[in-house]
Image (cartoon, rainbow, N blue to C red):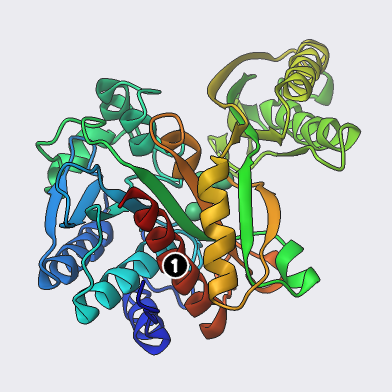
């Protein structure tokens, strides 16, 4: 097997080029899924893949598949996937490194005229972040049969625009049935989004699985009233109820530390006027832990807290669990390919679990899947300051290519 070397400079230049599509003044990216900026980066990505001779297909939830043929068309493709959508104050590497690292691997194969046994596909999964349309990992979830296509289409953003309408508006409501494609395997390269690799001076994480995730939505109802004329004893201040719950969510996670995490990330206060007592508050809750039984315990405490907090404040509430992504384990044979790929590139990998959700967590339900992590500075992510170095990006892409070729050799 040739010792194919990716071009780190070309990868870095490509990362920096696409970071301009939705660039923020603080050096990050705001490229929410199914916006015109998402369409712009999708169009660019499609053109880059077609320039390599790849056939690009789009499925009914907008997932993009760029396929390079292999010797044996009867073999299902080996996929390298991640996402190009970002958080509103996202970094330049979350998701993007996985798609552009795969593009760099594809460019390297193309330049070398290297013929793989199986076809090779790059995948751009729609709405991985869940920042615009909840829940996260929507397209990979439809592909894996977790969500129906129509459930995804109906998901609305906070302005009431639906996934289906926005997908059609940007021209990426594809013809392919989601999930109809088979993969021999999927490898996802991603930044760790945590501090472990950097703290241990390791370059490569051999990811064993992803922890469990649960999202909830709460609407607290009180009564809007004048802040100057309403006696304190008569107030039904929805924001007080929400504030107490924000504290309780944090406390519940801390009770199950160090592996549990929890936060309220999204809050909408209505009518949000200086001299009106808030009559209604909407907020989100994100709980995570490696085991379902602990998530069950955290959920029960959360619901008990709601029932304790609201009545004394004369408030009512609704609470809905909108997402439950159970812990998953990746496939040992693919993890071994990552370890071999890392050693081939001169790195000793470190086994670890992902704290963040990824499309790989759903794809592992329908195809052998695993992930490769590289460090990010201070473990900071979902922040414009997110930073992964030239060498770390190049190492990730090299290990991705090596792991894919190691798996491909086994299919021969
Ligand atoms: O929420 C997550 O972990 C991922 O960034 N979508
Ligand atoms: Mn991501
Ligand atoms: Mn993310």
Q: In the orientation shown, which residue stands out farthest toward the right?
A: 255
Residue 222 in the figure: left or right of residue 94: right
User: Is residue 293 placed above or below 19 in the rendered structure?
Assistant: above
Instruction: Determine the residue positioned at 69% across, 33% down.
Output: 287
Query: Which quadrant of the figure has residue 405?
Result: bottom left
Q: Quadrant of the N terminus?
A: bottom left
The residue carrying mark 1 is: 402
Residue found farthest to the bottom: 9
Residue 84, x across and y down, in percent = 35, 58
> Quick one: SS at disc 1?
helix
Instruction: Please name whichever residue, 109 or 406, is drawn nearer the observer in this view of the structure.
Output: 406
For the image, the number of numbered tags is 1
Image coords of residue 14 (percent x, y): 33, 79
| Front position in the image: 412 or 186 | 412
Label 1, residues with CA under 10 Å away: few <14, some 14-19, many ≥20:
many
Give whichever of 103, 2 is nearer the camera: 2
Residue 249 placed where, x, y %? 77, 32
Disc 1 beta carbon < 8 A from ligand 2? no
Q: Position of residue 20 (x, y in %)?
A: 34, 77
Does residue 368 appear in the picture of this structure? yes
Q: Residue at x 18, y 55 (%)?
A: 67
Instruction: Work out whether residue 97 can be spotted.
Output: no
- Up the image or down, 112 lies above or below 206; here it is below
Q: Quadrant of residue 325?
A: top right
What residue is drawn where x is 29% and y is 77%? 108
Q: Residue at x 32, y 80 (%)?
A: 17
Query: Up-down: is 396 above or below 245?
Result: below
Decide if residue 114 is on the left or right side of residue 80: left
Q: Considering only vertical position in the picture, is 6 above or below 312? A: below
């Amino acid at each position: 097997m040739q010792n194919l070397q990716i071009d780190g400079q070309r990868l870095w230049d490509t990362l920096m080029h696409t970071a301009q599509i939705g660039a923020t003044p603080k050096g990050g990216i705001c490229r929410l899924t199914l916006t015109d900026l998402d369409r712009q980066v999708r169009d660019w990505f499609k053109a880059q893949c077609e320039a390599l001779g790849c056939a690009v297909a789009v499925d009914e939830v907008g997932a993009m598949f760029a396929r390079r043929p292999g010797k044996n068309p009867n073999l299902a493709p080996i996929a390298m996937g991640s996402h190009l959508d970002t958080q509103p104050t996202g970094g330049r590497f979350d998701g993007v490194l996985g798609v552009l690292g795969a593009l760099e691997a594809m460019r390297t194969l193309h330049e070398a005229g290297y013929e793989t046994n199986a076809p090779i596909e790059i995948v751009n999964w729609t709405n991985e972040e869940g920042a615009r349309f909840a829940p996260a990992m929507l397209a990979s979830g439809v592909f894996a049969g977790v969500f129906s296509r129509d459930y995804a289409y109906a998901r609305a953003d906070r302005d009431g625009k639906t996934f289906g309408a926005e997908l059609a508006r940007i021209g990426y409501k594809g013809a392919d049935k989601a999930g109809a494609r088979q993969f021999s395997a999927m490898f996802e390269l991603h930044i760790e989004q945590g501090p472990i690799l950097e703290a241990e001076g390791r370059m490569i994480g051999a990811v064993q699985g992803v922890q469990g995730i649960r999202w909830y939505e709460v609407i607290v109802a009180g009564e809007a009233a004048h802040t100057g004329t309403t006696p304190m004893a008569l107030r039904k201040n929805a924001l007080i109820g929400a504030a107490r719950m924000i504290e309780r969510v944090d406390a519940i996670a801390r009770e199950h530390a160090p592996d549990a995490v929890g936060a309220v990330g999204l809050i909408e206060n209505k009518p949000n006027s200086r001299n009106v007592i808030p009559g209604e508050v909407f907020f989100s809750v994100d709980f995570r832990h490696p085991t379902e039984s602990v998530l069950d315990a955290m959920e029960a405490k959360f619901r008990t807290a709601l029932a304790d907090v609201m009545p004394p404040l004369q408030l009512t509430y609704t609470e809905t669990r909108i997402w439950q992504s159970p812990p998953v384990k990746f496939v040992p044979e693919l993890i071994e390919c990552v370890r071999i790929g890392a050693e081939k590139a001169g790195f000793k990998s470190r086994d670890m679990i992902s704290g963040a959700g990824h499309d790989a967590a759903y794809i592992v339900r329908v195809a052998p899947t695993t992930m490769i992590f590289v460090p990010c500075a201070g473990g900071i992510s979902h922040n414009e300051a997110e930073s992964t170095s030239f060498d770390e990006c190049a190492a990730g892409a090299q290990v991705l290519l090596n792991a894919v070729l190691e798996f491909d050799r086994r299919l021969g």
